[in-house]
């Protein structure tokens, strides 16, 4: 797991998840709007990308981190 890398925007997104997890996807959209200025579509695009990479999971509209912040 030492080879996992995040770009700056992905790290900012993961920080929101780490601070709030477990969080509903709807609440995550609101948090990303407030903290990052993102639209709903941007949040869901990044959410899917990071879920596909194994950084987090979105199950039953609940988002949880699969990797620790450290």
Image: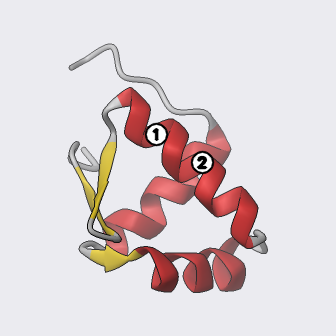
| Residue 67 point in image, percent of width and height | 22, 42
Q: Quadrant of residue 18?
A: bottom left
Q: In the rendering, at what x and y percent does residue 46 appear?
A: 60, 48
State which quarter of the image contains the N terminus.
top left
Separation (CA) of disc 2 from disc 1: 6 Å
Residue wearing tag 1: 50
Neighbor class of circle 1 (other Cα within 10 Å; few <14, some 14-19, many 20+) is some
User: Can you give x and y, in whole percent of width and height, for residue 21 in the image?
Assistant: 27, 72
Q: Label 2: which residue?
A: 46
Give the image quarter of residue 20: bottom left
Q: Residue furthest front?
A: 60
On the rendered structure, is 44 left or right of 37? left
Query: In the image, what residue occupies the spot 50% across and 82% down?
Result: 26
Q: Residues within 10 Å of mark 2 (few under 14, many from 20)?
A: some
Which residue is rendered at x = 60% and y = 58% of the image?
44
| Image quadrant containing the C terminus | top left
Is residue 13 toward the left or the right of residue 3 in the image?
right
Question: Are dots 2 and 1 in contact, CB under 8 Å?
Answer: yes
**Mark 2: which secondary structure?**
helix
Residue 65, given in percent of the width and then of the height, sits at 26, 54
At 73% from the left and 62% from the top, the residue drawn is 41
Q: Which mark is residue 15?
A: none
In the displayed structure, does residue 1 sit left or right of residue 9?
left
Q: Secondary structure at mark 1?
A: helix
- 68 or 24, which is in the foreground? 24
- Above/below status of 34 relative to 37: below
Q: Is residue 12 above or below residue 25?
A: above
Q: Quick one: which residue is furthest to the top in this view?
A: 3
The quadrant where residue 2 appears? top left
Residue 11 makes an appearance in the image = no
């Amino acid at each position: 797991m030492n080879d996992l890398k995040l770009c700056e925007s992905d790290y900012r997104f993961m920080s929101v998840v780490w601070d709030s997890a477990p969080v509903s996807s709807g609440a995550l959209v609101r948090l990303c709007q407030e903290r990052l200025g993102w639209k709903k579509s941007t949040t869901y695009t990044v959410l899917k990308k990071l879920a596909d990479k194994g950084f987090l999971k979105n199950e039953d509209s609940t988002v949880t981190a699969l990797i620790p912040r450290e």
